[in-house]
Image (spheres, rainbow, N blue to C red):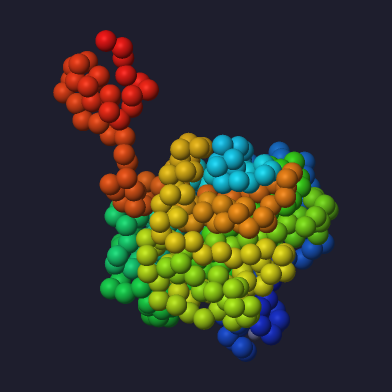
Amino acid sequence: MTDQTLEYVVLRCRGCQTAYPAALEYACSRCLGPLDPEYDAEEVAKRLSRDGIEAGPRSIWRYAPLLPATPGPGDLAPGLTPLVPAPRLAEALGVPGPLLLKDDTRNPTNSFKDRVVAVAVARARAFGLSTVACASTGNLAGATAAAAAAQGLECVVVIPADLEAGKVASAAAFGATVVAVEGSYDQANRLSMQAVEAFGWGFVNVNLRPWYAEGSKTVGLEVAEQLGWSLPEHVVVPIASGALLTKVHQGFGVLADHGLVERTPAKVHGAQSVGCSPVAAAFAAGVDEVTPVRPSGIVKSLAIGDPADGAEALATVRGTGGRVEAVDDSEVVEAIELLARTTGVFGETAAGVTVATVGRLAARGEFRPGERVVALITGHGLKTREVLDGRAGATVTVRPNIDALSEALAPVRPDLAVPG
Ligand SMILES: Cc1ncc(COP(=O)(O)O)c(C=O)c1O
Ligand SMILES: [Zn+2]
């Protein structure tokens, strides 16, 4: 395995700092700590510039010098999703300054997971693997299945059996073998680790995890570029494993290291649901360790009870002066509706968690006038549409004639009623 992009990348153990070559490894053989890619800063500096990025592809690959892979044929080119101002949502939530949504529902399979999968699958191909797989809370399954289909790879997705129908369908449609585990995500994840040993597949978030996680960095890189090469004062990030939050912050840092943005304070806030809030609980308790929980509730995409990068996410939040909040299921549903009705963006439950958290932080007075708040909308609402069942209040069923329409509208929308 060699490929040009990796000449200046090594893997370094997060625990004991041992360096390894950029091979298909994910745990330190000395201390079992996780491995992270580390780039030779001088080599990156030679390749990285604002002009080069701006002239690059309209996808995550515009940041090629900061990514440990090159896309192969069939890559779905995720990323460079819009950063859209949301003034009506800001007003409703009491955010005093600009609120911007990073709309990652606009990725190829409608979640930010297309980013991580693009990098992991590019590495899988460089490693010569023909089967890619994942342990997923839902979105990752669809993203992995789609990338595999587009690139002619075999795909197996391992999910908890109780996922939303829309998530299962969007993996099955791409021809993946869907393994529904009778148990939690954490059990599906443990089974996946055994499957790595037994079958040697490339699990994007297990043995390819060091590469996979790098894809999340591109969210931070794009936000900074889209803010005219500056860092937001606040970013609000949903937490499952904690990788997205950690890597968004790393993305900000690496741009500052290379002088592409000024190193201004950027508070990174975490968002969880009460049904699975191990990181929020540790934050509230003031401890460094994240104690695993058994997830419950409607927010299945964030239902990781034992988050792999939970402690890192917690340390990142604290290091920036941010907060981690936990919001309950009814707040999540209300936030999904509020988001949709004030911005035209239909987010899934994770987005509801983020938007409700923005409201919580605003109510606590965390945001000052003029400060820019970026909320990550990481997945599309159609995949979790059942949480709105029975709430879409404005459907009227009518016979196909105008009198019936007038009659039916009068009680529900008197403002629309036709005179006479
Ligand atoms: C829609 C959505 N948002 C956010 C996350 C959290 O990502 P991470 O596991 O990197 O914390 C996930 C994870 O599955 C997700 O599906
Ligand atoms: Zn180690």
212 and 180: which is toward the camera: 180
Q: Where is residue 342 in the image (x, y as percent from the top left)?
A: 50, 37
Q: How many marks?
A: 0
Please indicate whether residue 202 sits to the left or right of residue 411 in the image.
right
Question: Is there any visible trace of residue 151 in the rendered image?
Answer: no
Question: Is there any visible trace of residue 191 in the rendered image?
Answer: yes
Question: From what the image shows, is residue 192 above or below residue 388?
Answer: below
Q: Which residue lies furthest to the top in this view?
A: 420
Q: Which residue is drawn at 59% across and 62% down?
A: 270
Give the quarter of the image for residue 256: bottom right
Q: Which residue lies furthest to the bottom in this view?
A: 30
Q: For ligand 2, give the image quadrant.
A: bottom right
Question: From what the image shows, is residue 56 above or below residue 18?
Answer: above
Q: Residue at x 67, y 55 (%)?
A: 365
Q: Residue at x 28, y 25 (%)?
A: 409
Give the quarter of the image for residue 284: bottom right
Q: Position of residue 56 (x, y in %)?
A: 68, 42
Please indicate whether residue 332 sits to the left or right of residue 413 in the image.
right
Q: Which residue is drawn at 82% across and 52% down?
A: 262
Picture quarter with the C terminus: top left
20 and 390: which is toward the camera: 390
354 and 252: which is toward the camera: 354
Picture quarter with the N terminus: bottom right
